[in-house]
Image (cartoon, rainbow, N blue to C red):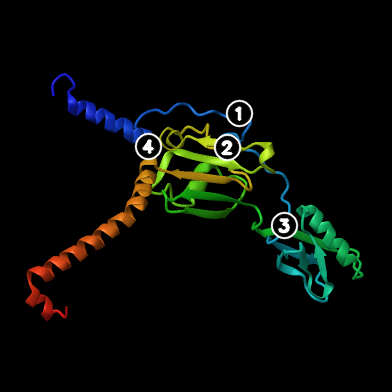
Amino acid sequence: MAGGGPGRSFLGLLALTLGAVGGCWHAPAPLPLHPNVPRELRKLTLPPYVIEPPDILLVEVIPTLDQPISGQHLVRPDGTISLGIYGSVAVGGMTLDEAREAIKTHLSSRIKEEKLQVSVDVFAYNSKVYYVITDGGGYGEQVYRFPITGSETVLDAISQINGLPAVASKRAVWIARRVPDASCGEQKLLVDWCAITQKGDAATNYQVLPGDRIYVHSDKLIRTDTIVAKILSPFERLMGFTLLTSETINSIRTNPNQAGGRGF
């Protein structure tokens, strides 16, 4: 195979094929960048947290009332929390400061206490989430739901599912950012997974925002193999049944006495 014969050509073709179908064997074409989108080294501070069901709040009222108000309070589906004998107060759609004032106003109308102090914080951030969706290479999709803390990037999100699945393509990862409807156009942020993990390139390690869908597509060869297997499987079963029937009939014709002993 001197001078780059068939063997070397085959190896080159194999390397190109592996690189094109999800590997990191050669440098891909640069992805379009979005300069105004927050990323790993230029994160955005999220706006004040808005309370929604089913968040859990920590509420404490000082001084102690007839029935103490302290501890965890679940935000109900209607956006209210229970204050025991003091009734319910609506906090859904409010910031923490607004919720504190709403609770203080609600209690002031029911008790005679001039120096009432109310503290409100979030115990569990349940209403703001993002999703990681992985394609199973022709066998459905897996959807993972995670609460957002305000500092996650694509790398953080993928680490929550212990890395890319075995059938994933390293060249087909993106963020689908939610939009009100199709008329607004899609917001699709392509992710260079190989650059993020192997080169430390933070250009496409975007910050994850509430409602983001991080989609991990499967390898093209695996998807193709799955489709072919699904198409051929019924025919293989039919051929197997036909061959089994044919062998049984031939066995009966060749050894009639043996067949009779088997109950034929």
* In front of the other: 155 or 186: 186
Q: Say which residue appears at 9% left-offset and 74% top-offset.
A: 256
Task: Name the image quarter holding the N terminus.
Answer: top left
Q: Residue 125's spot in the image, x, y percent?
A: 65, 56
As displayed, is residue 241 above or below residue 22?
Answer: below
Q: Amino acid at mark 1?
A: Pro
Q: Amino acid at mark 4?
A: Val
What is the distance, in whole Å, between disc 1 and disc 2 at their CAs? 14 Å
Q: How many marks?
A: 4
Q: Amino acid at mark 2?
A: Lys
Q: Tell which tag, 1 or 2, sits nearer the viewer.
A: 2
Find residue 21 and name its label. Answer: 4
Q: Earlier in the sequence, mark 4 or mark 1?
A: 4
Q: Is residue 24 visible?
A: no
As displayed, is residue 26 above or below residue 234?
Answer: above
Task: Name the image quarter holding the C terminus.
Answer: bottom left
Residue at the spot of label 1? 35
Q: Residue 70's spot in the image, x, y percent?
A: 74, 68
Image check: 83 left or right of 54? Answer: right
Q: Tell which tag, 3 or 2, sits nearer the viewer.
A: 2
Q: Amino acid at mark 3?
A: Glu
Residue at the spot of label 3? 52
Residue at the spot of label 2? 188
Q: Earlier in the sequence, mark 3 or mark 4?
A: 4
What is the distance, in whole Å, between disc 3 and disc 1 at their CAs? 31 Å
Q: Say which residue appears at 80% left-offset and 76% top-offset.
A: 67
- What is the secondary structure assignment of the residue under circle 2? strand
- Circles 3 and 2, Cβ within 8 Å, touching? The answer is no
**What is the crowding at mark 2: few (fewer than 14 residues within 10 Å), some, or many (at least 20)?**
few
Q: Residue 181's spot in the image, x, y percent?
A: 68, 43
Q: Earlier in the sequence, mark 3 or mark 2?
A: 3
- What is the secondary structure assignment of the residue under circle 4? loop
